[in-house]
Image: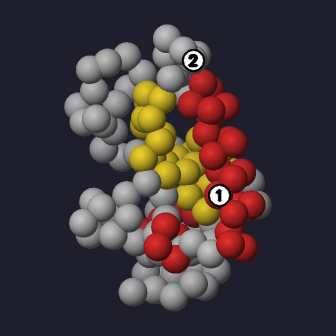
Amino acid sequence: MASLHDHDPNCLFCKIIAGQIPSRKVYEDDEIFAFHDIHPWAPVHFLMVPKLHLPSMAQVQPEHAGLLGRMMALAPRLALEQGCRPYPEGGFRIVVNTGLEGGQEIHHLHVHVLGGPRPWLKG
């Protein structure tokens, strides 16, 4: 398992952030990168990842609170920009899978933002 470095050269999401693997970018700033999920479960489905390589929520420490707070505060704006309808009739779901039993497949913390007209493939 990767340690808490700025990036992991073997990590798929680190490679996407670095531009080594193409993605359909939704948003980028100094700390956060967001891109469309390659296998969407809903009409709107994108991932938000910290540029810092954090393997999962299990490694989050108090010093990461600001970063995670920014991600959560950014999610509603990006969801609307990507086509989710406004609250309360519309809305979106935020999912963070952690560890094997939590359904995590890529070990770089990522937040799924899903929305759009129902029913969805999953959820």
Q: Amino acid at mark 1?
A: Leu
Does residue 32 appear in the picture of this structure? no
Q: Quadrant of the N terminus?
A: bottom left
Residue 115 position within the rendered picture, expressed as x and y whole percent measured from the top left: 43, 28
The residue positioned 74% from the left and 61% from the top of the image is 66
Does residue 87 appear in the picture of this structure? yes
In the figure, 73 relative to 71: above or below? above
Q: Which mark, by number, is residue 11?
A: none
Secondary structure beneath dot 1 equals: helix
The residue positioned 27% from the left and 60% from the top of the image is 103
- According to the picture, the residue beneath numbered tag 1 turns out to be 68
In the figure, 107 relative to 116: above or below? below
Is residue 59 left or right of 97 when viewed as pictured?
right
> Splitting the image into 4 quarters, where does residue 105 fall?
bottom left
In the figure, 88 relative to 61: above or below? above
For the residues labelled 1 and 2, the Cα–Cα distance comes to 22 Å
Q: Residues within 10 Å of mark 1 (few under 14, many from 20)?
A: some
Q: Amino acid at mark 2?
A: Tyr
The residue positioned 68% from the left and 41% from the top of the image is 74
Residue 71 position within the rendered picture, expressed as x and y whole percent measured from the top left: 65, 50
Q: Which mark, by number, is residue 87?
A: 2
